[in-house]
Amino acid sequence: MPRILRINTRTKEFNFEELGEYAGLGGRGLTSRLVNKEVPADSHPLSASNKLVFAAGILAHSGAANSGRLSCGAKSPLTGGIKESNSGGQFAQVLPKLDILAIVFEDKPAQDAPFSILEIYADKVVFKDASAIVGKDNYPAHEELKKVYGEKAVTALAGPAGEQCLTASTIQFSDPHNHPARSAGRGGLGAVMGSKKIKAVVLDPAASGRGKAVDQDKFKVARKRWTEILTGHPVTGEGLAAYGTCILVNIINEAGALPTKNFRNGRFDDVAEISGEKIAEIIESRNGKTKEGCHTGCVIQCSQRYNDKNGDYLTSGFEYETVWGFGANCLVKDIDVIATMDRVCDEKGIDTIEMGCTMGVAMDGGILEWGDGEAALALLRKVGTADPMGRIIGNGTVFAGKAFGVDRIPTVKGQSLPAYDPRSVKGIGVTYATTPMGGDHTAGYAVATNILKIGGDIDPLSREGQIELSKNLQIATAAIDALGLCLFVAFAVLDTEDAVQCICDMVSASHGIEFTTDDFIALGVNTLKNELEFNANAGFTKFDDQLPRFFSEETLEPHNTIWDYSVEELQAAKV
């Protein structure tokens, strides 16, 4: 039976326990329920009262396609609210092999306590001295761990930014290709890991096997249909595999919604130099790989291997938001420099979206020249070092804006906005404003319907229908996250009549329960209710559910659109 593993990071005691009141939950549903119940909403995110939770999804043990996502939850050091940060990698694949659904890191060692490596086994937790890898960037740290635990070591790492408890820090997870390239990127959860003096978590290298469905025949039928749904859709079966998420660069630019020069324009003149098509061309010319999975069992294959000019591996998981943040947002058109910044973020353990907006703010403040990618790269490399400028940058956009005297700060609830201007994709603007997560496109990806015309067609420039669209997508996304499914399955789900029923059939057969479409919706609704309750207790009000004022004061070319929703109107997007 799957269990929860609780680890006291101060006393080094641990306990395996049954799911109890958390039975029936997984992924984001479990992390958000546990954080809401067990973490005081008014506590400091870096205090002993905060808890860091790693949770695999409800379908994690099943082997269903694209069911290997991991949810990380805590009170966010960046937003001050609840946070679920979602990651690929092998961690959620291996955790169920130890009969563990979730790990809860509790309490906090003394400030001067050394960092530890935690070895996780099916029956014990071993604390090891981490001094050999403390201060190291994530790639060399992971290489050191591979020497001890084997080439395919499954790890979670706090980079130098996490060690310093910087609020833009990530937790980096190892992928199937033996790189620490998958990020629980948003919300600064690496700082929570660092506050608990955990440098690395390593899962038992001998872990093996896979859980069996209670009704294996029914599960095989549902799993087969699920794979057909994903591979048969033009986005999940073709587009993402060909160009990764960077297929969106040209699409969003053409829609006039690609935020350029810190959200001043909707189109980037040099977009061809950073497009998905250009990136694929470079990858192929350097013998990289245009399609890879971020975890075993992925059939979408939207990741890649991007090599440098010498043909050596540089980075993977090179996402649309990263290319936009360091590219169009900063007027940088050198894709190799942008790829190097992506690698530096993985090395230091910092969120690429937060850093893209932070660099835009630094350019607005005169710290950097617009379009100077090399200078931005040099500044980024200071994160995690003793240089005070590195601490300013590593604490994200709001912090840097205060330090640099800038008032154009593209954040909601303290978290930077991603790569879609809300004035010209109004559905995603509703999500930015109202999700408990802070500015976050993944919480309710209205771009699918607004721009890609998946699951319907709602004019992205119109006010009509956007609030209902965002609300429904936020509910569905919370359920998908709780199941441990990749967000990108939503493209196929929205366009396929029997997709949600197929998911329910997999859950039912896997666990030997009746799980209906009503249960699917309730899973999403209850997850959001936990998150909204936590944020309300933390002091958030309806006035925090709004975009920065400049979106309501400046029109966006080329459509001359403006953000025009009131605080009261947006409350209808809440469950």
Image: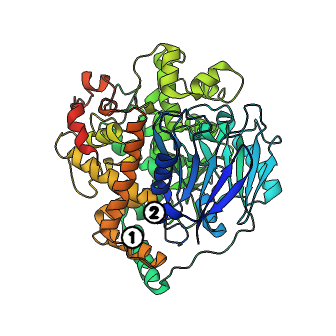
Separation (CA) of disc 2 from disc 1 = 9 Å
Vertical order, 80 against 305 (above or below) = above
Residue pointed to by mark 1: 503
Numbered marks: total: 2
Query: Is there any visible trace of residue 482 in the rendered image?
Result: yes
Q: Position of residue 429 (x, y in %)?
A: 30, 38
- Which quadrant, please, contains the N terminus? bottom right
The residue shown at (27%, 70%) is 497
- In the image, 275 versus 31, the foreground residue is 31
Left or right? Give the position of 120 relative to 56: right
Q: Position of residue 410 (x, y in %)?
A: 40, 28
Left or right? Give the position of 473 relative to 108: left
The residue shown at (43%, 39%) is 272
Left or right? Give the position of 520 relative to 395: left
Q: Residues within 10 Å of mark 1 (few under 14, many from 20)?
A: many
Task: Say what amino acid the circle numbered 1 marks.
Answer: Ile
Q: Residue furthest left?
A: 464
Q: Position of residue 486 (x, y in %)?
A: 46, 59
Residue pointed to by mark 2: 483
For mark 1, give the secondary structure.
helix
Task: Say what amino acid the circle numbered 2 marks.
Answer: Leu
- In the image, 464 versus 360, the foreground residue is 464
The residue shown at (33%, 61%) is 522
For mark 2, give the secondary structure.
helix
Q: Position of residue 109 (x, y in %)?
A: 72, 38
Asked whether the residues under the numbered discs 2 and 1 touch, taking CB atoms below 8 Å apart as contact, a structural biologist would say yes
Left or right? Give the position of 155 relative to 306: right
Query: Is there any visible trace of residue 439 in the rendered image?
Result: no
